[in-house]
Amino acid sequence: MEKPNVIEYSVSGRYALFTDPLSKTGGEKCTYQIPTYQALKGITESIYWKPTLTWVIDACRIMNPIQTESKGIRPIKYSGGNDLAYYTYLQHVEYRVRAHFEWNENREDLARDRNENKHFDIARRMVERGGRRDIFLGARECQGYVEPCSFDEGEGAYDNTDLSFGIMVHGITYPDEAVREEEKGKMTVRLWNAQMVNGVIHFPRPEACGIRRVLQEAKQKQFIFEKNFTGSAEFEGGDLFGMVEDLG
C-alpha cells in the first residue's frame, strides 16, 4: 500500500441498484452498469466513519460480468396503497475497492481527533469484521457483504477491457465536505465521464469533477459537547466502540 491510511476490500452481493436518476421520471428505476463514487463512499462509511475524516475512493475493479435482471416491484405510494413498477438490477456483483481517508478540513472543532494510526487501525479491523453497519449496494433491498482482499490479485471479468459508460452521476458534495469556496454552505451534485481501463475505474477526486450543479442551500452540522457527542472518548484520541469490540 502506498499510504498508511489506505484500505482495500471486496464487496459483493446478489443484487445491486445504482439508480440512474433519468429512469426515475416514470416511477421506475434502472441501474447504472457500474457503481457510482457516492455509492462506494457510502459503503466505505458503513465500514467505518467519523466526521473527523473524509473517505476518498481511488479505484474500483469490476470482478464479475455486468448482467442485469428486471423484477416486478410493488412500491408504496405516498398517497397510500401500492403501485406496480419494474426495477432493473445488476445481479451477482463483486467489486474490489481501494480507498483512503483524509482529514475533514471543515471540521476544525474535531482537530484533536486527528490521530491517523488510531483511525486506520479501527478501519482495518472493521474491514475484517465486515463493517460496522449494514452494507447496501445502492438500495436497501440489495444486501452487500464486505471482506478484506488484495486489490490487484485474482482474475477480473474485464482485466483486458476498456469501456466508456458516458456521463453519469459521480456523487453529491455536502456542505461539511465542500472544498470549493463557492460551494460551502450548499449541496452540490457532480457528474463525470465514466471510463474503465483494463477493468479498473479510476475516480477523479470530488473537487476535480468538471460538471457540477448547486442543488440547494444547506448547513453544516454542529457538534455540541454532551448533546450529540460524548467528548473525550469519542473525538480526542479514544474510541469506546472499538475498545468494547476488542474486549469481546
Image: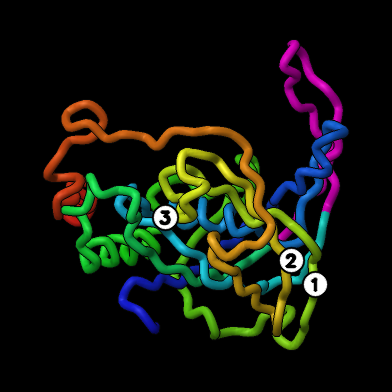
Q: Count how many numbered circles sit on residues in the image.
A: 3
Q: Is residue 32 above or below residue 66?
A: above
Contact, mark 2 vs mark 1 (Cβ under 8 Å): yes
Residue 111, x across and y down, in percent: 21, 53
Using residue 155 as the reference point, say whether residue 4 is left or right of it.
Answer: left
Quarter of the figure with residue 148: bottom left
Mark 3 vs mark 1: which is more N-terminal? Answer: 3
Observer able to see residue 27 = yes
Label 2 crowd bin: few (<14), some (14–19), many (20+), radius 10 Å: some
Residue, disc 1: 164
User: What amino acid type should be assigned to the residue bearing mark 1?
Assistant: Ser
What residue do we see at 65% from left, 52% from top? 212
Label 3 crowd bin: few (<14), some (14–19), many (20+), radius 10 Å: many
User: What amino acid type should be assigned to the residue bearing mark 2?
Assistant: Asn
- For marks 2 and 3, give the CA distance: 27 Å
Please say whether residue 78 is one of the residues in the magenta stretch: yes
Residue, disc 3: 47
What residue do we see at 26% from left, 30% from top? 228
Residue 3, x across and y down, in percent: 35, 79
Residue 168, x across and y down, in percent: 74, 57
Using residue 26 as the reference point, say whether residue 13 is left or right of it.
Answer: left
Residue, disc 2: 193
Using residue 166 as the reference point, say whether residue 175 is left or right of it.
Answer: left
User: What amino acid type should be assigned to the residue bearing mark 3?
Assistant: Ile
Contact, mark 2 vs mark 3 (Cβ under 8 Å): no
Q: Secondary structure at mark 1?
A: strand
Q: Find the residue positioned furthest to the top.
A: 80
Q: Secondary structure at mark 2?
A: strand
Give the magenta-colored segment's residue range. 69-92
